[in-house]
Amino acid sequence: MNLWELLDPRLLLDVVFASSLGVLLFSRVNEPRTLWLLRGYLFLVSVAWFVQRFANLPITSKLVDALVLACSLSLAILWQGELRRLMELLGTGRLAVLLGKPQNEFRANESTITNLSEASGRLSQSRRGALIVVDMGSDLRPEDFLYPGISIDAQLSTELLLNLFASDTPLHDGAVLVKGNRIISAGVILPLSRQGISRYGTRHLAALGITERFDRCICVVVSEETGTLSLASQGRLERPITSSRLLDLLKKLIGSSVSGSSTKVVASQAINSKTVLASLESKNISRSSVGKNSSNKETLK
């Protein structure tokens, strides 16, 4: 009897879809505690399915179903922000963000990291408060903020960042949103975090709040009172840091796209240099051949 006749096509599709969903979920989870909760929940779901499918245990099946329902409600409360974000991405059709594939507008270059670190260092030296949100693929929209701010859509530069956070400008109290190598908006009001309310100021709580909700964005914070530099990522704040440390962290967090673009630039430069050398060699060969022909003509004369 053929093996394909024994296998149920619906069972194969079920296994493929379930495996794909599991791989997608585990690839999008970065925090260890969240990963442990997800593993425990999937284990309970697997036990409930096994009891209902293969074991004739009605009381155990009801108890396991009630436990799975209680865990589902608990996870819905704990992950309400993530579930809301998932529904938004599915509703708007932004599957590239859901699959973790950043678009071209989020790809930074070396000048982006240099401008961010240089501007942050100069703001820290002058003790001017600043909050810079760098979107690395979360595709932040105006509805994700308490106030979307004023649209800028300008090329990122150190001078522009310094002007936006000048104390006598109306946009210096809000955050600046950066995507790729462009400044999207300024004067943005971010949602605040509930952790560390007694220890941190408003800027640091805003940086923690936005990075808790969206995992592919980071926040550079400059304290107005002390000039201390901080970096928030995935709901965690590293402070105090120096300008060199900030540069290293920026290279580590958003340097993957930079390395890819830089390798392409180096490759193109190498190709161009090879073509130039080849053209020069061909010109030298042609010149030498012309010189030899002229000398032969003179000897014949």
Image (cartoon, rainbow, N blue to C red):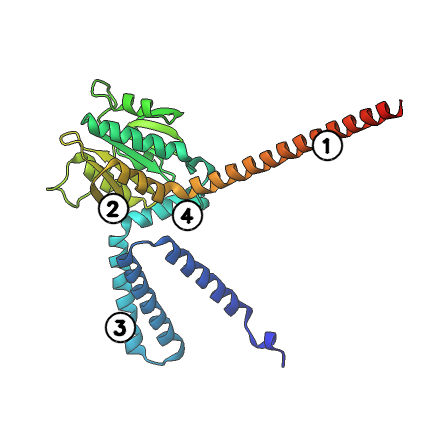
As helix, strand or loop, the secondary structure at mark 2 comes to loop
Q: Residues within 10 Å of mark 4 (few under 14, many from 20)?
A: some
Q: CA distance from mark 1 to mark 3?
A: 87 Å
Asked whether the beta carbons under mark 3 and mark 4 sit within 8 Å of each other, the answer is no
As helix, strand or loop, the secondary structure at mark 4 comes to helix
Closer to viewer: mark 3 or mark 4: 4
Dot 1 or dot 3: first in sequence order is 3
The correct choice, above or below, for 109 with respect to 126 in the image is below
Asked whether the beta carbons under mark 3 and mark 2 sit within 8 Å of each other, the answer is no
The correct choice, above or below, for 242 with respect to 87 in the image is above
Query: Which mark is drawn over residue 298?
Result: none
Q: Which residue is mark 4?
A: 98
Asked whether the beta carbons under mark 4 and mark 2 sit within 8 Å of each other, the answer is no
Q: CA distance from mark 4 to mark 1?
A: 57 Å
The residue under the point 25% across, 27% down is 122
Whether residue 41 appears in this view of the structure is yes
As helix, strand or loop, the secondary structure at mark 1 comes to helix
Q: Which residue is mark 2?
A: 235
Q: Which residue is mark 1?
A: 285
Closer to viewer: mark 4 or mark 2: 2
Q: CA distance from mark 3 to mark 4?
A: 34 Å
Q: Residues within 10 Å of mark 3 (few under 14, many from 20)?
A: few
Whether residue 174 appears in this view of the structure is no
Q: Residue furthest left?
A: 198
Of 288 and 203, nearer the camera is 288
Closer to viewer: mark 4 or mark 1: 1
The residue under the point 30% across, 40% down is 218
The correct choice, above or below, for 48 with respect to 130 in the image is below
Q: Which residue is mark 3?
A: 63
Closer to viewer: mark 1 or mark 2: 1
